Amino acid sequence: MTAITILGWIVFGICVAILVITMAIDLSGGQLQWDLLEGNLSVDTPTYLIGFGSLFVIFIGFILMAGQLKTILKTLIDGDPFVPENARRLTRLALIVGGMEIFRHILGFAAHAFQVNTSMNFSINLAAWVAVITLMVLSQVFAEGTRLREEEKMTI
């Protein structure tokens, strides 16, 4: 495992521990109470769960993207980036980013449906969808580069 993967799992473990501890502290009122420096922060349980779901989606997407990028960079370091697997990896990256955006909308819909007071909205994140399109185009460029390279190897 790489250091970034280990760090991601540590952060995930901390988030799960915080969720379990805060849910166990106050099971009766549906309110999570934390004494801060000069005040009291109160977050209701549904809002907390929607926020934790958002962090979970971001974490899973981060781990999946880091794995794909690691293998792409490994082929680059080996001096052979135009391999068929890299085109598929770039397509997977695009699908991961698109999936994260779709899950963000699902969580926003769930928050709205259950009348949870969050800052999540149904706006379209144009940067994320441009990244999806760019990664898809780049995967096709890599696939074509691989095809041309194989064709060049066959010429005398």
Image (cartoon, rainbow, N blue to C red):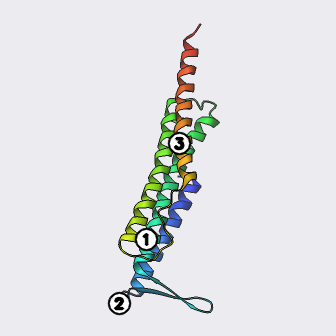
Secondary-structure class at tag 1:
helix
Along the line of sight, the residue nearer the viewer: 99 or 4: 99
Q: CA distance from mark 2 to mark 1?
A: 19 Å
Nearer-N-terminus badge (3/2): 2
* Residue 107 % position (x, y): 41, 65
Q: Is residue 130 above or below residue 38?
A: above
Toward the bottom, the furthest residue is 38
**x 54%, y 56%: residue:** 125
**x 58%, y 15%: residue:** 152
Nearer-N-terminus badge (1/3): 1
Residue type at tag 2 = Ser
* Residue 135 % position (x, y): 54, 41
Residues under numbered marks 1 and 3 in contact, where contact means CB atoms less than 8 Å apart? no
Residue type at tag 1 = Ile
Label 1 environment density (alpha carbons within 10 Å; few <14, some 14–19, many ≥20): some
- In this figure, which residue is indicated by the disc labeled 1? 50
- In this figure, which residue is indicated by the disc labeled 3? 133
Q: Does residue 38 appear to the left or right of 41 in the view shown?
A: right
Residue 145 falls in image quadrant: top right
- In this figure, which residue is indicated by the disc labeled 2? 28
Residue type at tag 3 = Ile
* Residue 19 % position (x, y): 44, 76
Q: Is residue 83 above or below residue 18?
A: above
Along the line of sight, the residue nearer the viewer: 108 or 135: 108
Label 2 or label 1, whichever lies nearer to me, is 1
Nearer-N-terminus badge (2/1): 2
Q: Does residue 29 appear to the left or right of 57 in the view shown?
A: left
**x 49%, y 34%: residue:** 85
Q: CA distance from mark 3 to mark 2?
A: 47 Å
Q: CA distance from mark 1 to mark 3?
A: 28 Å
